[in-house]
Amino acid sequence: MSARPRRRWVAAAGAVAAASLLVAGCTSNEPQETEETATQEAPQAPSGGNDEQGDEVVIGFSAPASDHGWMGSITKSAQDVAAEYPDIDLRVAEGTNDVNLQISQIEQFINDGVDAIVLLPFDGAALTEVAIKAMQAGIVVVNVDREFDDPTAARTTVLGDNYGMGISAGRFICDQLGGTPDAKVAEIAGIDSLPLTQDRSKGFADALGECGLKVSNRVAADFTVQGGEAAAANLLQAAPELDAIWNHDDDQGVGVLAAIEAANRDEFFMVGGAGSKNVMEAIKADDTVLKATVIYPSTQAADGIKLARLLVQGKSMSDLVEVEVPRTVQLYAPVVTKENVDQYLPTAFES
């Protein structure tokens, strides 16, 4: 628990208006040196607006196990951002895919009296009840990526855009093949039973439809390297000639590329998904079938940490006229190509 008198969300809500519209962008990363800072290498908050040091905020963080490059980056990004702010005390629970264990982690945060909880649930529905319990205890809850069943279970939700990923991938392929009405377009999805996969596929089909194309061959993998390789091998065997492939996930894409190389195929171009570092480097090198990828930000939890800090400190988002932190923040799904890859490489994750 914070040593200072706790500024719970319930109490802070009424004070937000007076403290809003502060400037978020840092104007300098060189705070004045004092005798104390000269002898201690304590983190220094960027100066200016919302980044200026405020009251201490104790944040509990919980996410699934880092068994996937994207998920590993989620936790690391959250920790890296928290380390930039001396006024954040981040308490990270061990990553787990055990729903009951994750529920107990949140209950412990409640008992500890943290100021905020940033939670990427393994299963949004299963974690809803305990998130509501935290909110009722006056703790700010920021839901990341996988939504709770009840919108009152979180003050703010940070989301990627799965449907938008499909739209972006489909429109890029349309731009490349739109003048070829009989083009063969394949899709390698993730786990078909997940809503996120269904949303990505729907967006992809909708976008291809805009230019008169459709998915000619489709397989589903499981977001793993092994699953991607097996699914791609089956796809390539069934489709002797292709013009384009969209692979939903760059981690499973490592296996997809291995299958493509094993089959000695290169008559098509490929678009990835999520935005891993190795995929972006391949796009930049321009010596494989990979020509683009679509971002699904692994910085969502880092954004959640920053929003939790603003909420507890009674601040708002700088460049909005609105005086409250938004209820939902949905991140964009841009296409990364050789032309703009340098812009996105700094936020890419390791597969």
Image (cartoon, grey):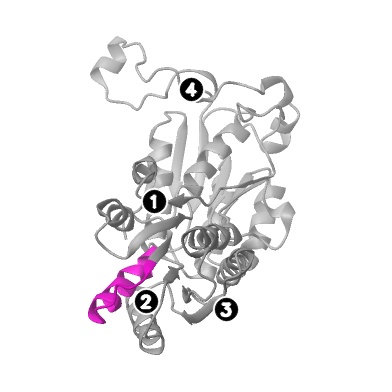
Specify the amino acid type for callout 3: Ser
**In this picture, residue 212 sits left or right of residue 293:** right
Residue 66 belongs to the span the image colors magenta: no
Look at mark 3 in the image and give the residue it sits on.
193
Query: Mark 2 packing: few (<14 Cα in 10 Å), some, or many (20+)?
Result: many
Specify the amino acid type for callout 2: Gly
The residue tagged with tag 1: helix, strand or loop?
loop
Where is residue 67? Give x, y as percent.
37, 66
Labels 3, 1: front one: 1
The residue tagged with tag 4: helix, strand or loop?
loop
Q: Quadrant of the C terminus?
A: bottom left
Contact, CB < 8 Å: mark 1 with mark 2? Answer: no
Q: Which residues, given as a range, are shown in magenta?
A: 250-269
Look at mark 2 in the image and give the residue it sits on.
228
**Rendered residue at 29%/50% (across/down):** 284
Query: Mark 3 packing: few (<14 Cα in 10 Å), some, or many (20+)?
Result: few
In the displayed image of the protein, which residue is found farthest to the right? 14
Of the two numbered discs 3 and 1 on the same chain, state the one appearing first in sequence.
Answer: 3
User: Could you tell me how far apart the alpha carbons at marks 2 and 4 are, in whole angstroms?
Assistant: 45 Å
User: Could you tell me how far apart the alpha carbons at marks 1 and 2 are, in whole angstroms?
Assistant: 22 Å
Which mark is on residue 168?
none
The residue tagged with tag 3: helix, strand or loop?
loop
Which mark is on residue 53?
4
Specify the amino acid type for callout 1: Thr
Of the two numbered discs 3 and 2 on the same chain, state the one appearing first in sequence.
Answer: 3
Where is residue 153? Give x, y as percent.
69, 54
Labels 4, 3: front one: 3
Judging depth in this view, the residue of 229 and 240 nearest the camera is 240
Of the two numbered discs 4 and 1 on the same chain, state the one appearing first in sequence.
Answer: 4
**In this picture, residue 186 sits left or right of residue 309:** left
In the displayed image of the protein, which residue is found farthest to the bottom? 238
